[in-house]
Image (cartoon, rainbow, N blue to C red):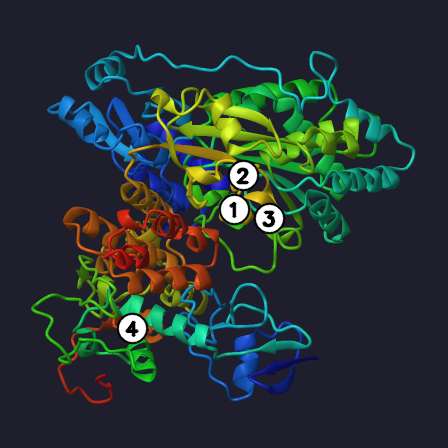
Amino acid sequence: MRLIRELEKLQEERGYLDPASLRELASRLRTPLYRLEGLASFYPHFRTWPVPAVTISVCRDMACHLAGGDGVADALEVEMAGRDDVRVEETSCLGCCELAPAARVNGRASRIGGIGDFGREALDGSLSVERPAPRAWRCDPYGTGSRYRVLSEALAEESADSARDRIVKVLEGAGLRGMGGAGFPTGLKWKLVRREETVPKYVVCNADESEPGTFKDRVIMEDLPHLLVEGMALGGFVVGADRGIIYLRHEYAEARMALDAELRTARAAGLLGRRVLGSDFSFDIEIFVSPGGYILGEETALLEALEDRRGEPRNKPPFPGQVGLHGRPTLVNNVETLALVPGILKHGSEWWRSLGKGEHAGLKFIAVSGHVERPGVYEIEMGTTVRELIEEAGGVSGGRALKAFAPGGASSNFLPADRADVPMDFATLEEAGSMLGSGALVVVAEDTPMLPLAANVVRFFRNESCGKCVPCRVGTEKASEMLESTMATGAPLDWETIEKLQLLLCETSICGLGYVALNPLLSVAEHWPHEVPGSPGSRHDE
Amino acid sequence: MIGVTIDGRRIDVPGGTTIWEAARRLGVDIPVLCHDPRLEPVGVCRICLVDIGEKKLTAACVRRAEDEMEVRTSTPTLDACRRGLVELLLSDYPCDAADRFKTAPDELLGLARELGVAWPGNGAGSTAGARTADVGGILAGGGRPVDDSSKVISVDHQACILCDRCIRACDDIQVNEVIGRTGKGYASRIAFDLDVPMGESTCVACGECEKVCPTGALSLRDLAAGADGWERV
């Protein structure tokens, strides 16, 4: 954490990471120059060139593509032509898909209305930032009452070990699963890390959601920071860790402020720090702001970043639960997962299970984006159908018909409108041919061309590949080139080669980025073969 | 000791031994490009993937053998993957790579020959002046520079497969700590110090990086054709 923080400090002081300062830093820290080069060139937050007065970073990904964002960066560039105090650049998904098409101007995210107005306001600093008002959420067991009671009651129990047993049992009974995408059973994960004998142990909150369409954790951190802090403390209590780290994506400035304030409040109340509430349990939390990149949401890449290396996923096993941060057992959980824990422990597993629809258990935060009237974050009952959620979000925008949807972010397969009655849950979405993924429903209206959308997603994975393993580094590039060429010329895709690339990405990549990179394309070819020249379905019709 | 079965043959090895190492003791050479027994394995080229009956294939160079593990080093899927990975790498590989002077044979081209991957390089096909060519339907890449700033070693970034061997050799065998990776994704390259030309870096020209490089990326300069003692691959 030290090197990356030093680089951040240097960038803050000097505006960018210039070679002379990097040399000075390397010699002061006695670290090889190549190490600083590796970090400065890998993480998008770091700049190795002088930064002009205004930087406009225009999102190029899924929700912004659907909102007509293609070409916005070029148009802004034309608008700003001749000004050397402005830099217009394209960037990966900013995590504010409800503002699509969106851009960040000197670090603040805004909707791009008209190019002219946006450009003018970006320059004079008058851009308004829309923020949804904080809402009451059903998963919060405290409402306006006093908080952290679950933690204080657990710490007050006579036997800490039986309190730990009970917590794990309730989480297992509730059937809570990881809400970051992988869906690993939370109670089991806590039990496994608790069982490890190596100390110290760590609790890491993965607050680096960066998949196009995904912004639910941002809202949870802004509105319910106390639940995240309490969830982490409970995790630390159960597994026997005394240190927690929130790995936060750097675009989430408001979430950071909310968390900072909450951490101060909790420390002042004796809920964090040495001997929490007078018990034998000591635990504190710090925030580590990610220097950027989607791949850092992969838990071992995230740990590499915390160890001051390039965020390149590790070969697994071993898994972080056994060999995590600094080689120690590490409980890594997603924001939503941790924030749901206090409510479940407060009211019990039966209560939690009863919140879902029918046989589905609990609540789920879903970010809704794309072609809907009211994009945003919705707290739904698990088992709510995609169609119901789209209705809750005001319906398909402009009164259009639904064509397609991706229920779990950019990595989830697109499904056609006739499957919109699928209940949203892990198993049901898998059965329907997609996944719950990162909790991000992306809605696609009729008349939307699917090939450019699929190509947009493949390009995202190409852009965000870390470059460590051959199949992902080279395969995503080659697939992306093939798609660009087909879109430019209309020539059919060489489908045999697409299938070969899919085999390599899926079977030989080190991490999930490679596994999923072509899935959206293949799902588009399956359901809309006429739109994918060269795909098997398109050939049958010839 | 733990007992593992590799392609139907059993061997007992000490705990902590990798599958790749256990196979080697059995006389089974699992092909690999990023590994060298003198270096800590990194598992990035994926050529040494094996099937141990798990959901995912696993890299033999990094994965520790476990008691009663059943390892298959060749299946239709594994063979297709290995071949496909070599095709991916060759689609970016300079067609004249084998003309360079190396202290050891080019392992990527050796593997390609072994697997029977057709490659239009080195006179085998027309490349129309381009440095690279399409391989097995995979589009040719290009545009990466050659760095001839060092008096001793030539760096052809187009021939680099990012195997990380030079980086580890520079750090762990010679403790010179000069080479790393710069950039991200497909744009990643090896780099010297703060990405300066090799000849302007703190490189002491020890030659270790060239020796461990499995491709034509790091080769020897200033050797007249036919110089004694150097194999021309």
Q: Nearer the viewer, residue A74 or B28?
A: A74
On the image, the x and y values in percent for residue A450 come to 31, 42
Q: Which residue is mark 2?
A: A422
Residue B87 visible to an observer of this rendering:
yes
Task: Please identify the quadrant where the C terminus of chain B is shown.
Answer: bottom left
Which marked residue is nearer to the observer: mark 3 or mark 2? 2
Q: Give the answer, above or below, for where B27 lies relative to A532.
A: below
Q: Give the answer, above or below, for where A435 lies relative to A125.
A: below
Q: Which mark is residue A92?
A: none
On the image, the x and y values in percent for residue A144 come to 70, 11
Q: Which residue is mark 1?
A: A432
Q: Which residue is mark 3?
A: A325
| Nearer-N-terminus badge (3/1) | 3
Q: CA gap, disc 2 to disc 1?
A: 7 Å
Q: CA gap, disc 4 to disc 2?
A: 51 Å
Mark 4: few, some, or many residues within 10 Å (few <14, many ≥20)?
A: many
* SS category of the residue bearing label 4: loop
Image mark 4: chain: B
**Quarter residue A401 falls in:** top left
Which marked residue is nearer to the observer: mark 4 or mark 2? 2
Q: Which residue is mark 4?
A: B215
* SS category of the residue bearing label 1: loop
Residue at mark 2 shares a chain with residue at mark 1: yes
Q: Nearer the viewer, residue A150 or A376?
A: A376
Q: CA gap, disc 4 to disc 1?
A: 46 Å
> What's the residue type where badge 2 is placed?
Val
Residue A108 visible to an observer of this rendering:
no
Residue at mark 4 shares a chain with residue at mark 3: no
| Nearer-N-terminus badge (3/2) | 3
> What's the residue type where badge 3 is placed?
Leu
